[in-house]
Amino acid sequence: MDKKVFLFTLLFVLLFGTFASAHSGRTDSSGGHNCSDKSISKGLCTGYHYHNGGGGASSGAAIVNTDKDCTDFANYDEVVAYWNAKGYSATNDPENLDGWGNGQVDDGIPCEVPSGYDRTKINNSAEQAQHLQDEKDMATGEKAGYSQGLSDGYQEAASNNVSTSNSEAFKVGYATGYNKGYEEGKAKVTAEKTKATDDGYALGQKQDTISLPTAYANHAGLKQAFESGFSKAVTARVEAKKKETKDLGYADGKKDVLNVPKDMEEVYVAAYHEGYDMAQKELKEEYIKQGYEAAFVMLEYTKPNLTNKKLIDWYKEGFESNTEIQQIKADGLALGKEGEPYKLPSQYKNSEVIFKHNYQLGFKEYEEKKSDTQKAAVGGLGGLSLVWLGRRFYIARKMIR
């Protein structure tokens, strides 16, 4: 009896040990288990699923299950970190973490990915592969765009054309690179244009004939900049020389000496005459003014002490053009004719000679008229006296008779 109990107990221990080994790692004897509510709420798994392919143990040896289950992770970032560290993929998933964790989905996404999760973080996923390809295309496009933009910017001819057959990522990179290259190319040619302008100006300061350097001949913008600088320098030289000859003409005009430089280009001869004529005009105005002012202090025109007939004629023209003295003469004459005491009006203080002379003429006329009136009065009185005496004599005679 004791022998039977011992054998039964031994058999029970062996069977219990095998059963326990088959359920290590929270799995049943088939190597699987139901997903917990907690794991379902996290989106890590759903329903019943297996580990190590399921199906239970193939031998009576104890099984130690080291596989990870989707429920073993606190959050999805831990799932991804584990998946990436192991280097797993859709074709390399020994722990059966792909999809729902039941071995039926092979899309390279472990467990149940939360909605909106950035799948490019998951190694070997289609999204990551596309992301890496986009980055590569973008870098390639940026390089190509930069090269073209640099060339276009330097040539000052924007195009920014990209083939429609390229990926969208390539196009985006191309546009970014092109804009950057174009600005750099533009900055480079702008600096070179400044130098070209300076070089052209330096040549223009030395000579009138342009000689275009090879470095600028094949670039429209640089060629134009060089020519502009050259033209500016030549113009500056011409204007400087024109001013010089104009000043010479002006000086001669003031001296009333016409001495046009010989063997000089027509443009400079014209400048000389311009200066000369300007001085002559000013000179004429000066002598006309002198004559005009002289008329305020001279009773009659007196030839100035000059030998140049032209200057004398201008002086006389000014003297004769003064019409203001007519009013001065009239006012002086009128005051004198009225017999008023002499008093010079303040506005005529600079022409007293004219005013006083005409006052005296008027006053003389006044006195002469006054004298004539007095004589007439005396003559009339004498006649009346004779008539009265004659009448008295007549009366006296009659009385005597």
Image (tube, rainbow, N blue to C red):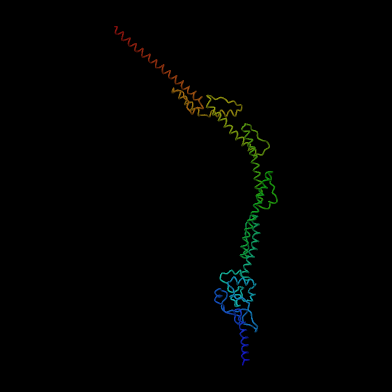
Task: Place residue 305 in its image quadrant.
Answer: top right
Q: Is residue 386 above or below residue 200?
A: above
Task: Place residue 64 in its image quadrant.
Answer: bottom right
Q: Residue furthest front?
A: 2
Q: Residue furthest top?
A: 401
Give the side of residue 361 with respect to residue 120, left or right: left
Observer-nearest of 121 and 157: 121
Q: Residue furthest right?
A: 214
Q: Horizontal and vertical percent for residue 371?
A: 43, 18
Q: Horizontal and vertical percent for residue 22?
A: 62, 82
Observer-nearest of 136 and 199: 136
Observer-nearest of 122 and 369: 122
Q: Residue furthest bottom?
A: 1
Q: Quadrant of the N terminus?
A: bottom right
Observer-nearest of 365 and 150: 150
Q: Horizontal and vertical percent for residue 95?
A: 63, 76
Q: Is residue 126 above or below residue 204?
A: below
Give the side of residue 220 with respect to residue 372, left or right: right
Disc count in the image?
0
Q: Quadrant of the C terminus?
A: top left
Q: Horizontal and vertical percent for residue 267?
A: 64, 40
